Image: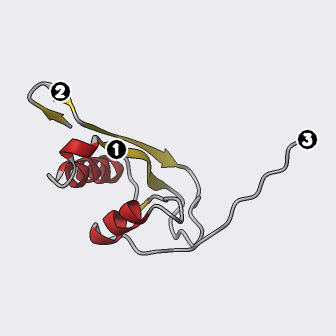
Amino acid sequence: AVEDDQVVGLVLGTKRKFPYLERGLEPDQGWINVIFVKEEYRKKGYAKELLYVCEIWSKEIGCKEFASDCELENLASFKFHMAMGFEEANRIICFRKML
C-alpha cells in the first residue's frame, strides 16, 4: 500500500499445497503470511485493500479457500479477521523444547 509515494503497508501471501489450516476443506489454500500497515496509516482501509488483492490472486491460481492466523493475544488482528469475513477454525498452543 502506498500513500504519497511512501510505502505504508504490505501483504505477503502464499499458496499452501495441502490443508494446512486445521479443519481446512480444500487441498490448495491461499494464505496470508504477513499483513502490516504502519500504525499512523491504520483505519484507512489499507489492510482491507491488501487482503482483497491477496484473495483475488488466490482465486486466480485456483484456490477455493483462504486462510490466516494470529497470536491468541493479538486482539486487533482477531477483530480484523472477523470483520473481513473469516471464521475462527481453532485455537492452539504451540510448544517447543530446546535440545
- Disc 3, disc 2: CB below 8 Å? no
* Three-letter code for the amino acid on which mark 1 is drawn: Phe
Question: In terms of secondary structure, where does tag 3 sit?
Answer: loop
Q: Camera-side residue: 53 or 81? A: 81
Mark closer to the chain start, 1 or 2: 2
- Disc 1, disc 2: CB below 8 Å? no
* Three-letter code for the amino acid on which mark 3 is drawn: Leu
Mark closer to the chain start, 3 or 2: 2
Mark 1–mark 2 distance (CA, rounded to whole Å): 14 Å
At x 64% / y 68%, what residue is drawn?
92
User: Percent x, y for residue 39?
Assistant: 27, 45
- Name above or below for residue 5 compared with residue 44: above
Q: Camera-side residue: 51 or 24? A: 51
Q: Camera-side residue: 10 or 19? A: 10
Relative to 72, 62 lies left or right: left
Mark closer to the chain start, 1 or 3: 1
Q: How dense is the environment of label 1, judged by Cα within 10 Å: few (below 14), some, or many (20 and up)?
A: some
**In the current view of this chain or complex, which residue is farthest to the front?**
40
**In the current view of this chain or complex, which residue is farthest to the right?**
99
- Number of labels in the image equals 3
Residue at numbered disc 2: 6
Q: Is residue 87 visible?
A: yes
At x 41% / y 75%, what residue is drawn?
87
Q: Quadrant of the C terminus?
A: top right
User: Percent x, y for residue 49?
Assistant: 20, 50
Residue at numbered disc 3: 99
Mark 1–mark 3 distance (CA, rounded to whole Å): 33 Å
